[in-house]
Image (spheres, rainbow, N blue to C red):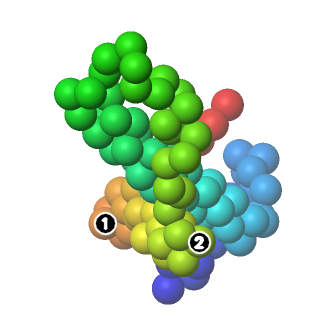
Amino acid sequence: MLMQHVTHSTNNTSHGRSSNNAVHVASIAVAGGLAGQFQHVTSHLSEQWLALAYDGTMNPSSPSLLRRLVHASWPTWRSTMLAFPPSAIGFLAFEYGKLMVAGDGDDDMVAHSP
């Protein structure tokens, strides 16, 4: 349904736009999925860094914060891979949500990049 709506409402050759909307939708989905995975890993490591920084044992005899962060646990591959689909869907919803809610096929509703 999304592909049909996007193809129908944005396939306008009078403005010189490409009719290859499947590539556009796929690129937005991949960008969203990768951004979600990056956010997942970053938040996992930053939570550990904050816990190490505020554990109350920051005295000269304790190992350095960076040395302790090296031994921090990384998120599992499964949780990182499962972060991809919701983020991809979220990016698509953000990009095409206004277009689908409007439903009139107006080209004024589509955000065009220069």
Q: Kindly identify which numbered label has been placed on residue 101.
A: 1
Where is 59 relative to 101, above or below?
A: above
Q: Secondary structure at mark 1?
A: helix
Give the labeled residue for mark 2.
Answer: 77
Q: Nearer the viewer, residue 8 or 111?
A: 111
User: In which quarter of the view is residue 52 placed?
Assistant: top left
Give the farthest residue toward the left.
56
Q: Residue 75, how many percent across, how many down?
A: 50, 62
Q: Nearer the viewer, residue 112 or 108?
A: 112
Q: Residue 7, how many percent across, how many down?
A: 63, 72
Give the farthest residue toward the top.
60
Identify the amino acid type marked 1: Val
Horizontally, is 65 left or right of 15 in the view? left
Give the farthest residue toward the bottom.
1
Q: Is residue 4 visible?
A: yes
User: In which quarter of the view is residue 11 placed?
Assistant: bottom right
Where is 40 relative to 26, above or below?
A: above
Counting the numbered discs, the total is 2
Question: Which of the two discs, 2 and 1, sits closer to the camera?
Answer: 2
Q: Nearer the viewer, residue 99 or 31?
A: 31
User: In which quarter of the view is residue 50 placed?
Assistant: top left
Which residue appears at 69% of the width and 59% of the height? 27
Q: Residue 111, how many percent across, how many down?
A: 51, 44
Where is 106 relative to 56, above or below?
A: below
Q: Residue 4, how many percent across, how many down?
A: 57, 81
